[in-house]
Amino acid sequence: AWLFTSGYVSNEATLSTLAKLLPGCVVFSDELNHASMIAGIRNAGCEKRIFRHNDLAHLEELLAAEDPSVPKLIAFESVYSMEADVAPIAAICDLADQYNALTYLDEVHAVGMYGARGGGISEREGLAHRLTIIEGTLGKAFGVMGGYIAADQTIVDVIRSYAPGFIFTTSLSPVLVAGVLASVRHLKSSSVEREGQQASATLLKTMLDDAGLPVMLGETHIVPILVGDPIKAKRISDILLAEYGVYVQPINYPTVPRGTERLRFTPGPSHTPAMMRELTEALVEIWSRLELRKAA
């Protein structure tokens, strides 16, 4: 594995370096990949093919159209933070095997929160060994900062030797690294936090759905509520903070397409049913006040 100063840097540095060094490399990228992945692919200066989100048929169509001798890399995420859905990792690995492609999986929104030892969705599904590179963050679930890649020794050495995002920046301080180590070690052995988060997410989804709010139901801990208007999304966020003491960011373009603006909640194991009930009641009141459309 190799350590970077953030998840953004680990994505940008690794993807740009690897794709640049592989002669004629073509990167196949999910259309909803994070901005850091897009930046890395763009900075590589290589050919790229964008496949529709989690669309295996479209991905295979693009792979089949390429010269079999051309180096290929499929870049995708495990948990998509704006849609709250999960990639079909096993099926993508099958396509990678069939078309002789490398795989790059971003587990930023899954590490610490999924898998018996917090290794992410790939660990939960027993697929980590099938992936060429797994990338993750040391923020979010681990609560500190930093990013990393896990790969075989050859790939790690290549990135270490050639990635400007690693070579020409300051390393993480020993204090931060000590905090990261403590977090990782704890979450490798404790499932209490993971189980608590999943229970909280399930309860919040149920409360919001029962209240008729336009919650975007998914299989992960991420709970988005569709608003569909950037000004109203910001207004809801402002009211929640000023009048109810609840902080939630509005998610607007370019993070999501225009017309799909939303609020995104990520309940944790320390959020109580009473807190989530208060949040739901606040949202119902705001939806009524602003005359917003409820769920169909």
Image (tube, rainbow, N blue to C red):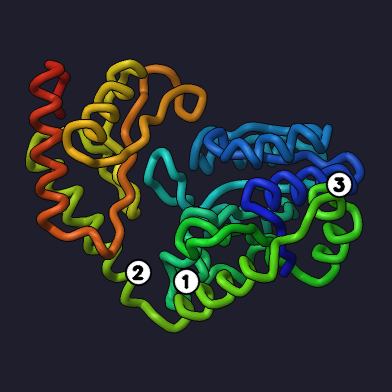
Q: Position of residue 42 (x, y in %)?
A: 75, 32
- Foreground tag (1 vs 3): 1
Depth order, front residue of 188/231: 231
Q: How far apart are marks 1 and 3 (CA)?
A: 37 Å
Q: Which residue type does callout 3 highlight? A: Ser
Instruction: Label 1, secondary structure: give it.
Output: loop
Residue that badge 1 annotates? 118
Is there CB contact under 8 Å for labels 1 and 2?
A: yes
**How busy is the neighbourhood of tag 2: few (under 14 within 10 Å), some, or many (20 plus)?**
many
Depth order, front residue of 91/24: 24
The answer to whether residue 112 shows anywhere in this view is yes
Residue that badge 3 annotates? 69
Q: How far apart are marks 1 and 2 (CA)?
A: 8 Å
Q: Which residue type does callout 2 highlight? A: Arg
Q: Position of residue 223 (x, y in %)?
A: 29, 45
Q: Where is residue 273 in the image (x, y as percent from the top left)?
A: 12, 58
**How busy is the neighbourhood of tag 1: few (under 14 within 10 Å), some, or many (20 plus)?**
many
Instruction: Label 2, secondary structure: give it.
Output: helix
Badge count: 3
The C terminus sits in image quarter = top left
Q: How far apart are marks 2 and 3 (CA)?
A: 43 Å
**Which circle's residue, 1 or 2, is located before the other in the chain?**
1
- Residue at 32 percent across and 38 percent down: it is 248
Residue 194, disc: 2
**Which circle's residue, 1 or 3, is located before the other in the chain?**
3
Classify residue 30 by image quadrant.
Answer: top right
Q: Where is residue 267 in the image (x, y as percent from the top left)?
A: 28, 53
Residue 205, disc: none
- Foreground tag (2 vs 3): 2
- Residue at 45 percent across and 61 percent down: it is 141
From what the image shows, is residue 164 above or below residue 294? below
